[in-house]
Amino acid sequence: MYAHYAAIVQSSGMGKSRTVDELAKDHFVIPLNLWEAKPEFAKHRFEVYEVGLHHIAFYTDTREQVDRACELAKRLGAKVLDGPGEFPYDPEGWYAVYFLGPDGLKFEVVHQPSAVKRYAEMMRIAEQLMKH
């Protein structure tokens, strides 16, 4: 499966920072670190509507990828909040699943055809600019 992203998940000391640095030489990179709570904060679960982060969304190229992500989340014990299914957020389509991770962090995996089109157009323009 071709993807427009690379997920780098490793424990500390495994060369993760060097890998990200090398990847960033040729690709746009957004580092995102999620950590388990320290013991003194473990009893305070993540609350979606507190100040700060609401949820983390991952975009896919197809609806099937959303379905596969949902099945994986279920196998790993995540609590599915909604979906997978269509939601009325974009007239061109918004097929998503929403679930909670083990610390209560909310995740969304979504296929939004308009975003796929925008990404393809952005890459086409970027490639043209790189030729000049």
Image: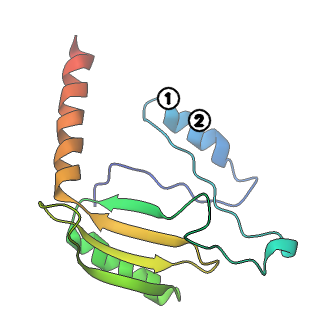
Q: Helix, strand or loop at disc 2? A: helix
Residue positioned 21% across, 51% down in the render: 116
Estimate the x, y position of residue 120 in percent, counting from the top left: 19, 42
- In this view, 54 is above or below 5: below
Q: Observer-nearest residue: 43 or 19? A: 43
Q: Nearer the viewer, residue 124 or 21?
A: 124
Residue placed under numbered mark 2 in the picture = 21
Toward which corner of the image does residue 43 lie, by quadrant?
bottom right
As drawn, the label of residue 40 is none
Q: Regarding mark 1 in the picture, which secondary structure is present there? A: loop
Q: How is the image coloured?
A: rainbow
Q: Position of residue 129 (x, y in %)?
A: 23, 18
The residue sitting at 51% across, 43% down in the picture is: 30
Describe residue 8's horizontal placement relative to residue 59 as left or right: right
Look at mark 1 in the image and give the residue it sits on. 25
Q: Seen in the image, is 132 located left or right of residue 104?
A: left
* Number of marks in picture: 2
- At 33% from the left and 48% from the top, the residue drawn is 4
Residue at image position (64%, 73%) is: 46
Picture layout, residue 92 above or below residue 27: below
Q: Quadrant of residue 101?
A: bottom right
Quarter of the image for residue 39 reads bottom right
The amino acid marked with disc number 2 is Asp
Q: If the image is split into quadrants, where does the N terminus sit? A: bottom left
